[in-house]
Amino acid sequence: MMRRIIYFLPLLVVAVLLVFFIDGLQRDPRKLPSVLLDRPVPAFALEGLPGRDPALTGKDAFTGQVTLLNFFGSWCVACLQEHAMLSRIQAEGLVPLHGIAFKDQPEDTLRWLERHGDPYDRVGYDTTNRIAIEFGITGAPETFVIDAAGVIQYKHVGPITEQVWAQTLRPLIEDLSTP
Amino acid sequence: MRRGIEPAADRTAQRGTAPALTGAALGLLVALAATPAAAVEPDEMLEDPALEERARVISRDLRCVVCQNESIDESNADMARDMRILVRDRLLEGDSNAEVKQYLVDRYGDYVLLTPPFKPTTYVLWFGPALILVGAAVAAVAYYRHKAKAPAAPPPLTAEEQAQLRSLLAMHGDDTGTSSKPDPKTPKARSKTPRRGGSA
């Protein structure tokens, strides 16, 4: 009897491994879990772009209503890809959209916004990358959905496509906006 | 004239090659010593060598989050540079090594640590290999014990079997008697046939 069980042991081990492997195959290795979810927006104060903005500060820009915070830079190709979508989001007027231009010079950011259109409500600039690290940013673009209490609810890595907006972000924002 | 120049040329040549060789050797030495070296730029370094050394130690255990498998100490990525500077700034502010690491873990998760932390979700990672080794050792010991026990002392022959054995041995004795004579059909003769067949 004992012998029979031992003969089936390798099969059992393979079955268990298969379950883990199949699970592993379905994960995206580039997708990193954000530890910032369900945590309040980090405190920060960034100067606005010269001649354009009031300053962008953590807490007060993100309380009272659901907001989007988009990390971008004039150096970032993928940001240009999502730019039209950001303009549409702004036109839709569902949420305020703030931007943080990181690892960028303010004059470059301004020129970029002039050339491609400016979908942001407020833009802070972070030449040192320090605030980006504060938000656990690994690249651009990355977009956070922040609820009315200033708590981070969602992080989207990569350009916002029409699909991402329609299927993920907008439903989430609508859900968060209705108390 | 020629004679006069030659030795001089020789001497300069010798003088020229010796430094070139030591130079090459030194270069090689430097290159070898520099292999595990870092991407840290001089302008990033702290003035206090003790603090700088701590920064290096910490950096070696922090993953560059944009390069998947390099420490920020080795990576030339912009992001890694910014994180190196951040590590140094935290040290200057008086953080301990653990506090600096925690600061980044709070923002990037355990993923930034190149050494996985020891906690319930990583127990499998830490104990798994040891468990497999122990399991294999237990299985091996059990297997060899079982094997050693199995063929031990077969039951003695019964009287009937003894008789059978004796008669078989007697027959075998006859066989050996006849086969001691060379036989034309023994292996030697037979061995030729396949060779012939092979060449045909």
Image (spheres, coloured by chain):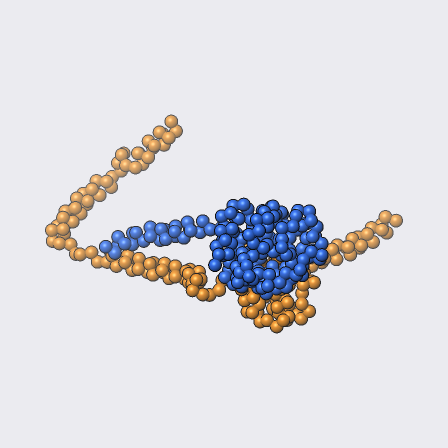
In the image, A11: left or right of A168?
Answer: left
Q: The blue chain is which one?
A: A
Q: In the rendered image, which quarter is residue A46 located in?
A: bottom right
In the image as oriented, which residue stretches furthest toward the right? B1
In the image, B92: left or right of A165?
Answer: right
In the image as oriented, which residue stretches furthest toward the top? B200
Question: From this viewpoint, is residue A177 visible?
Answer: yes
Q: Closest to the observer: B172 or A13?
A: A13
Q: Where is residue A141 in the image (x, y as percent from the top left)?
A: 59, 52
Q: Closest to the observer: A103 or A10?
A: A103
Q: Position of residue A102 (x, y in %)?
A: 64, 56
Q: Position of residue B134 (x, y in %)?
A: 37, 62
The number of numbered discs placed on residues in the rendered structure image is 0
In the image as oriented, which residue stretches furthest toward the left? B160
Q: Closest to the observer: A62 or B159?
A: A62
Residue at the spot 60% in from the left edge and 46% down from the top edge: A84
- Residue B49, relative to residue B63: is it above or below? below
Q: Position of residue B118 (x, y in %)?
A: 46, 65
Q: In the rendered image, which quarter is residue A45 located in?
A: bottom right
Question: From this viewpoint, is residue B84 visible?
Answer: no
Residue at the spot 19% in from the left edge and 44% down from the top edge: B172
**Quick one: quadrant of the N terminus of chain A?**
bottom left
In the image, B9: left or right of B156?
Answer: right
- Residue A38, relative to residue A161: is it above or below? below
The colour applied to the residues of chain B in this rendering is orange
Residue at the spot 27% in from the left edge and 58% down from the top edge: B146
Q: Closest to the observer: B79 or A71?
A: A71
Residue at the spot 82% in from the left edge and 52% down from the top edge: B9
In the image as oriented, which residue stretches furthest toward the bottom? B94
